[in-house]
Image (cartoon, grey):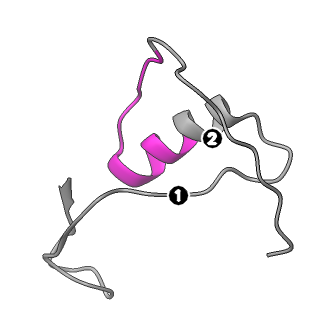
Amino acid sequence: MTKRAEHCKVAPNVWNVPAGKVKYEEIPVQGLYREAKEEINLDVELLEELSVRNLKSKS
């Protein structure tokens, strides 16, 4: 859980679960690293990959 900053335009000071999407043709683990950096400004290390689901949508 992370708390959004008070200066955010959308949902300031709200607690939420960081989330994101894997970009088209991006390897899921690459999306993990990118989203962790974007959402919570952390460089993460993958210890073990438990499972991966790949779904393609039109959006």
Q: Residues within 10 Å of mark 1 (few under 14, many from 20)?
A: few
Disc 1: which residue: 20
Residue 26, image quadrant: top right
As drawn, is 13 to the left or to the right of 19?
left
| Marks 2,1: beta carbons within 8 A | yes
Q: Earlier in the sequence, mark 2 or mark 1?
A: 1
Nearest the viewer among 56 and 2 is 56
Please tell me how crowded label 2 is: few (under 14), some (14-19), or many (20+) other residues with Cα within 10 Å: some
Residue located 52% across and 22% down the image: 50
Residue type pointed to by label 2 = Gly
- Name the residue: 20% across, 81% down: 12
User: Relative to 5, is 56 on the left or the right?
Assistant: right
Say which element carries label 2: helix
Residue indicated by mark 2:
31
Identity of the amino acid at label 1?
Gly
Label 1 sits on a secondary structure element that is: loop
Q: CA distance from mark 2 to mark 1?
A: 8 Å
Residue 36 coordinates in the image, percent (x, y): 44, 42
Q: Which residues are magenta?
A: 34-46
Residue at point 54%, 19% (across, down)? 49
